[in-house]
Amino acid sequence: MTVLSDKGILQAMKDGELGIDDFVEKNLTPNGYDMSILDIKVGRDGETFTEGEVIIPPMTWFAASTKEYLRFGPRITSQLWIRTTWARRGVLSSFGKVDAGFEGTLTLSAFNSSDREVVIPIGDRFCQIVFEWLDTASDKQYAERSGNYQGQRGINLGNE
């Protein structure tokens, strides 16, 4: 696999291999793109916030969705990494790989492991997505393999 540079990301978008709705040039990094927060749900049964600053209490789980809507071609996959800004404040998160052919926003699961409140502004950059080229196009893309979250918008906690 090859990681796409900033130039490679822009070229993949131009060629229609990758789509990022609500793309913001300043979120482009040398080897990725910083994803912004659309909304945050504090606790599994808690309130969902769509504006302002969200206070995450100590030792509290939360979920966020990305503002950006992604469209991956058959040769694009990605990894997600929490921005160090949030890791330094005690926010822990575990991300998966985004499959070739995926389309939608991403739901991000995180935990405030610190002994202090963490304030997260809606719209702030939360994680970096690093795009990669697969060596060949996948035989079956995400929608054909599982597609559980294909086309999602906003926070989707899945089946419980």
Image (spheres, grey):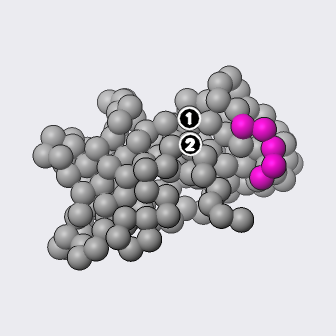
User: Which kind of residue does numbered mark 2 sit on?
Assistant: Gly
Instruction: Check residue 46 for magenta coloring.
Output: yes
Instruction: Check residue 156 for magenta coloring.
Output: no
Q: Is residue 129 visible?
A: no
Q: Do the residues under discs 1 and 2 have CB atoms within 8 angstroms?
A: yes
Residue located 56% across and 42% down the image: 154
Q: Quadrant of residue 30?
A: top left
Residue 2: give x, y in percent of width and height. Answer: 24, 65
Category of crowding for the residue at label 1, using alpha-carbon neighbours closer than 10 angstroms: few (below 14), some (14–19), many (at least 20): many
Q: Give the magenta-colored segment's residue range.
A: 44-48
Residue located 33% across and 41% down the image: 20
User: Which kind of residue does numbered mark 1 sit on?
Assistant: Leu
Tell me the element at label 1: strand
Residue located 37% across and 46% down the image: 70
Residue 69: give x, y in percent of width and height. Answer: 41, 42
Q: Give the residue at mark 1.
A: 38
Q: Is residue 42 visible?
A: yes
